[in-house]
Image (cartoon, coloured by chain):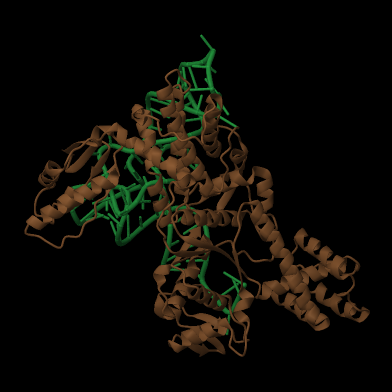
Amino acid sequence: MQQNIINQLKLIVDEIIKESDFSDINYKIRLQENKDKEHGDYASNIAMILAKNLATNPKNLAEQISKDFPLDDDILKVEVAGPGFINFFVSEATHAEVLKKIDSEKVKYGHSKQKAGKVLIEYVSSNPTGPLHVGHGRGAIFGSVLASLLTAAGHEVDEEYYVNDYGRQMNILTVSVWLRYLQTSNKNISMSALGYQGDYIKLIAEELFKKNKEKYQLSDNDQDNILPILKEQQDEKDIDTLISFMQSILGEGFFEIRSFALDNMLDIIKSDLINFGVEHNLWFFESSLYVEEKGESSKANKAISDLSSNDFVYEKDGAIWFKSSELRDDKDRVLQRSNGDHTYFSSDVAYHLDKYNRSYDRIINIWGSDHHGYLPRVKAAMEASGKDLNKLEVVFIQFANLVRNGEKVSMSTRSGDFITLSELINEVTPEAARFFYINRKADQHLEFDLGLAREQSKDNPLYYIQYAHARICSVFNKVKYDLEEDHKSVNLSLLTSEKEIEVQKHLTSFPSLIEKAAKSNDPHLICYYLKDLASLFHSYYNSEKFIIEDDNLMNARMFLLKGIKQVIFNGLEILGVSSPEAM
RNA sequence: GCCCCGUUAGCUCAGUCGGAUAGAGCGCUGGAUUCCUAAUCCAGAGGCCAUAGGUUCAAAUCCUGUACGGGGCACCA
């Protein structure tokens, strides 16, 4: 219906422009839904936009357009109002079209039929040196909901986790596991104050011992050497001494333990994510950027030579620098340190080039908002390599504060006083956590009220929505309504009450809501849409009886409820939340 | 110092490709259940959309300045 009006308007406006002294006027017609029904169902502001171009005033132009607008059984009245709005009044029957559409498209209603290109979403990508904590939760949910949202919008989506398995922190993880391993049989060994302290390290060490028994134990002589090193663990560089020592006595064993620790850490992270309903289909390892195959140089080195062939690289103080300051960054950045090590940034340049080379139409990074200062240098590197910056989108996720009993839960990673994601899920249920994390705009601070998320009451918006679905199912149960049956004979022209029309209009807007949310990476809009839909339903439910004598009217209302139920289901599906049949 | 994000009802927040009278939930006041799930609904009170300018027929929405709050400015990852 809306599209019909837009098409018709376009015909008329084109004609007016053709007859005028002006040409080459670019315009786009948008139809807005009116809040106030005094103004009709839809309105167009096209006359106000074009008045100036056509050297006339908006009211006259609006009159001219509306005078030519053909009326029929669906479009009952067109009138000019206010400063030059053109208001359209459509027949009640047209609103019911959407119910048939929903009924035929089912779970696909709201999904785009057009292909919208390939997208890569990289998210979470937390260092594999500890379990996920609540700080990662918001990004995890955001990424996974955005993935299903974009899928609904017609994109082909890959979800990727970038594993930092190359740098120094992996060595610290390795040495931490080893010390815990030694402790199982050697009381003299103490944990380094600079290592990872969490209990998960002990669990990995126990596994290591089960699998390999005494393989990595110390000789008496080694023990005499390690004790003084362990005593002296205060400065950052002290743990490097320990790492070197471990490498010198274990040789290949060091790498065996490292890879064992990494595999175990990833298992922990993956299982936390899966419990949360988050699943990546791609895992990209930073270390793969440093593999040299068949005499070819590594991707990391290729990245540097890419930049330097475009004259964006120079050497200073023994290090290799990227001239990012020439491309809107604050200063130049080091790619390779004077000791020969690549920086994290260097990996990231190579990683992003790799993403580009995999030919996606959109490359989306989900980053914590504390990384926003990092974006200019990455963009600079891509620009210097001749990549299209429009393809790269970064969504910054603000921190979430946990609130329990009205008080902020204090957290600091340093003291180890953080709440892990699995603890959160134990406290509130994965679904509640998903909903509360996604219920706010990403770049806004969020207060996550643990008590509320756990509460099964009207205060909890998730239950409010799910309850609407369950209520509909309950009505269907009572009347033994057959959802599978073909309801072709239903007479939808009976749905004429104010509330019935309002809810049908809301159902009609679902596809454009999906499209809009997908375009701007704003999955939270779905939450608000569903709350509104649930609210319209509950209000309707309280104002009408559904199980009534009049079979025709009852069937029409059942068909409407069926549509509402389907859209709630489709919306919650994107959020990764269930639609219970009974509560 | 420089850069990013924010500031909307008592609280938590939507709304920002400019549109007619700025919304929701909570909280507050009052009401609805012999009847399909009251985990619900209905009504009321509550706003200089931080602030000062600018652009426009039209600004919470776009531009500039200011104040306040959060974050970021490594040969760390």
- Which quarter of the figure is the N terminus of chain A placed in? top left
Please, is residue A290 above or below residue B59 in the view?
Answer: below
Residue A65 in the image: x percent, y percent?
14, 46
Tell me, what hue is chain A? Answer: brown
Q: Is residue B4 left or right of residue A572?
A: left
Residue A527 in the image: x percent, y percent?
48, 44
Q: Is residue A167 left or right of residue A226?
A: left
Please, is residue A221 above or below residue A67 in the view?
Answer: below
What letter labels the chain drawn in green?
B
Q: Looking at the image, which residue is at 52% across and 89% down?
A: A316
Looking at the image, can residue A349 be seen?
yes
Q: Looking at the image, which residue is at 19% across and 42% down?
A: A86
Q: Looking at the image, which residue is at 35% across and 32% down?
A: A501
Q: Residue furthest right?
A: A220
Nearer to the camera, A485 or B19: A485
Residue A320 in the image: x percent, y percent?
53, 86
Looking at the image, can residue A235 be seen?
no
Nearer to the camera, A204 or A417: A204
- Which quarter of the figure is the C terminus of chain A placed in? top right
| Count of numbered labels shown in the rendering | 0
Q: Looking at the image, which residue is at 72% across and 74% down?
A: A171
Residue A77 in the image: x percent, y percent?
19, 35
Please, is residue A157 above or below residue A339 in the view?
Answer: above
Q: Quadrant of residue A139?
A: bottom right
